[in-house]
Structures are given as structure tokens and as C-alpha cells.
Amino acid sequence: MEMLQPTADDAMVILKLYELRQEERLRKARHWLLFTFQPANAEEFFAVAQTSGSEENAFFRQATSYWEMAAAMVLRGAVNADLFLDSNGEGIAILAKFSRFGEAFTARMHRPFMAKTAELTRQFPAAQAIHDRMAARFRNNIAPSHQK
């Protein structure tokens, strides 16, 4: 894959993504998903992932879809991957946190869990490194850095 230098437009997209992350409801959703939601098994995971109408389900969908949108921008070339990965790892952390439910999610929902973020992780070694580091932290019950 050809390495392109980030442009001013790439920087503006990164800044806009950061600005959007600060929106109050998205901040609550992101915090809840990373720090509060601790499903012990697939049934607890799906109790949230499939229960439309609950605040928890809204948080789950909002945070995962935000990061899926951002990953899609990188994968489609709308933003420089290196710049994105230098400044964003939270979506990959969410993927790592819930990857143990990935096969069950695919079977039950008929689509992969966080498919764009997973693709980003497969395509870019820096993303894979973030994923591996975060997966190890979650396996050891160490929460990611607390960023609101």
C-alpha cells in the first residue's frame, strides 16, 4: 500500500472527528461502552446489542457506528490512515474488548461485528498493534486509558 503524506484536509477531518467525539451524548455512549458495560458472557452482550429502545442499546449503536464511520473514511481514502491511527485508537479498543463475541455476533446478526474497524485492523500494522495491545489489557482486566 502506497504511503501518502497527510494533507491539511486530512488534519481537518481528524479535528472534526475529535470535535464530534466531544458531543455530550456521544461522550456518554463512549464512556459507557468502554468503562461501564462489562458483559460476562454472550447473553449479557446480546441483551444490550439486540434490545432496541433501551438507553444502553442506543449507547452501543451510537459508539460503534461512530467508529465504524471513521474506519470507513480511512478505508476509502478520505483520511490518511497513519494520521488517523496516530490520533485515534478507541474504535479499535472497542473491537478488541468485544472480539470474544465476534463469531456469535456474526451468527446471530448475520453480519460481522464492527466490520470496517476489523478491516482497518487487518490492513494496517499500526491498527493491529493497537488491537493487540488493547486485547491484552482487556484480558488482564485493565481498562484503557480513561479519556472522556
Image (cartoon, rainbow, N blue to C red):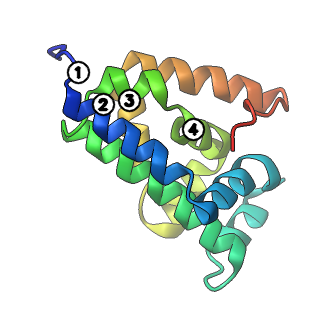
Residue annotated with mark 4: 90
Dot 3, crowdedness within 10 Å: few (<14), some or many (≥20)? many
Of the numbered discs 2 and 4, the one sitting upstream in the chain is 2
Of the numbered discs 4 and 3, the one sitting upstream in the chain is 3
Which amino acid type is shown beneath numbered disc 4?
Glu
At 64% from the left edge and 20% from the top edge, which residue is drawn? Answer: 133
CA separation in Å, label 1 and label 3: 9 Å
Q: Is residue 112 left or right of residue 58?
A: left
Residue annotated with mark 1: 6
Q: Is residue 59 left or right of residue 9?
A: right
CA separation in Å, label 2 and label 1: 7 Å
Q: Position of residue 62 (x, y in %)?
A: 54, 64
Dot 4, crowdedness within 10 Å: few (<14), some or many (≥20)? many
Q: Are marks 2 and 1 in contact (CB under 8 Å)?
A: yes
Which amino acid type is shown beneath numbered disc 2?
Ala
* SS at circle 3: helix
Q: Where residue 84 is drawn, which disc sits there?
A: 3
Which amino acid type is shown beneath numbered disc 1?
Pro
